[in-house]
Amino acid sequence: MRNEIVHIGAGELNYEIRNIMKVVERMKALGVEVNLENIGDPVAKGEKIPSWMKEIISSLAMEDCSYSYCPSKGLLETREFLAARNNTNGGPRISSDDIVFFNGLGDAIAKVYGFLRSTARVITPSPTYTTHSSAEAAHAGMRPICYPLNPRNHWYPELEELRNRVKYNPAVSGILLVNPDNPTGAVYPVTLLKEIVAIAEEFDLFIIADEIYQNIVYNRQETKPLSAVIGDVPAISMKGISKELPWPGSRCGWIEVYNSKKDPQFAKYVESIVNAKMVEVCSTTLPQKAIPRILDHPEYESFLAGRRCRYERFSEIAYNSLKKVDGIITNRTNGAFYATVVFEEDRLNPRQRLPIANKEVQSLVEELCSAPGMEPDKRFVYYLIGAAGICVVPLSSFNTDLHGFRFTLLEQNDLKFRKTMETLAACMEEYLESVPASTSLPRRVLTAQ
Ligand SMILES: Cc1ncc(COP(=O)(O)O)c(C=O)c1O
């Protein structure tokens, strides 16, 4: 090429949740039956869409106006409906003007970071949902700036660390939080949210809160939407219907902007995001029409409550199966539908293996694992797919130095999920003990002494 044409941030774009499917396809071609625990799509995992919801959508599909463009920010009646819902939180009041629709939150995330000045950084959690960290790093053309979530403390953010990293990095202009969290399943108590808001206030930052799982909280965990604690701090909350209805194929999500007028820079930044949507014309119309009808349907709350109940039960099954494994950190999740396991430091090494009966599959796994720079947790994940047909996502692909993996709680069948969790626990034990860490003796030897 005459000129460099590749964006400086191109190398930051990575989405292992889907990348891993290339490996799965190769294993399937060799006869491995794979149980997909990698993608957060409830419908793909067999969740049933109730017939009353389908009736709402099919009746909308019979109306001609569902096929037209809608206003750039989104349908007025839907934005009014959502603003009114937010205004029951007791926080700053918003109007339909403070809401902008996107083609899924993935689109919102791309625009929110894409229209931020490249020298202005948003500090992201580590680990975090990579669409955020990749988009943020790509906009800056640099590695993400992160604050750690602590697996030994319910995966809550280390606030002192967050404060210091904000304090000593003047480029940091915003803080991202994800509540309930993907990939950890953590739900933040109100006090913690208030402390993050206080840091933003102290250093004159804005907040981005991804609240796509806001109504998927269980185990009687108490939290609040960001808008209830935000006070006067400028903020963007991201919400959507992919997980909650669930309707990920609708490609429909929105942002709510709080305190947009409190800071002229922030107001201009939000305006640039709205203008970007205008240039693009608008977002998907039909799902926007469906939102008020579905959320106001008399059966909606009980439908959602039933789903929360199942996630709570599966969270318990996963925790009880995995907590027995020596050498890992596991947590009981309280929200969303993911759980994350971390291997303790120095427990993984490149000689560990799982036995794989099919020789061709074994060769493929060995070949994949011999790639230069192979992350130790990715190695475990490849062995797990080859040996047990369970596909999870390596934790190292979630913007963290920790090693482990994320799996979903979306299985429909209790027995199958129990079996998957027991197999997962057995595979971790076998893998770790195949070549134990030199610094620590395996549990079997310890208990024999
Ligand atoms: C935290 C979080 N934010 C955003 C998204 C993307 O949502 P959408 O389907 O609306 O693009 C996901 C999807 O997994 C997610 O987990």
Image (cartoon, helix red, strand yellow):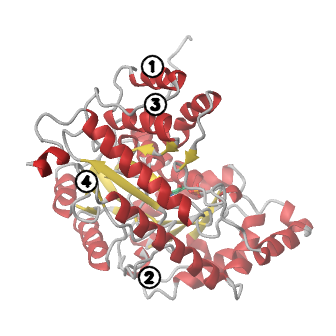
Q: Who is closer to the viewer here, 99 or 226? A: 226
Residue 235 visible? The answer is: no
Name the residue tied to disc 3: 356
Neighbours of disc 3 within 10 Å: few (<14), some (14-19), many (20+): some
Neighbours of disc 2 within 10 Å: few (<14), some (14-19), many (20+): some
Q: Is residue 45 left or right of residue 91?
A: right
Residue at 48 percent of width and 41 percent of height: 388
Q: Amino acid at mark 4?
A: Pro
In the displayed structure, would residue 152 be above or below residue 188? above
Instruction: Check contact, mark 1 vs mark 2: CB within 8 A.
Output: no
Instruction: Check contact, mark 3 vs mark 2: CB within 8 A.
Output: no
Q: Who is closer to the viewer here, 416 or 316? A: 416
Q: Quadrant of residue 411?
A: bottom right
Q: Earlier in the sequence, mark 4 or mark 3?
A: 4
Name the residue tied to disc 1: 367
Q: Amino acid at mark 2?
A: Pro
Q: Amino acid at mark 1?
A: Glu
Task: Count how many numbered circles sit on residues in the image.
Answer: 4
Q: Is mark 1 within 8 Å of ligand 1?
A: no
Q: Amino acid at mark 3?
A: Ile
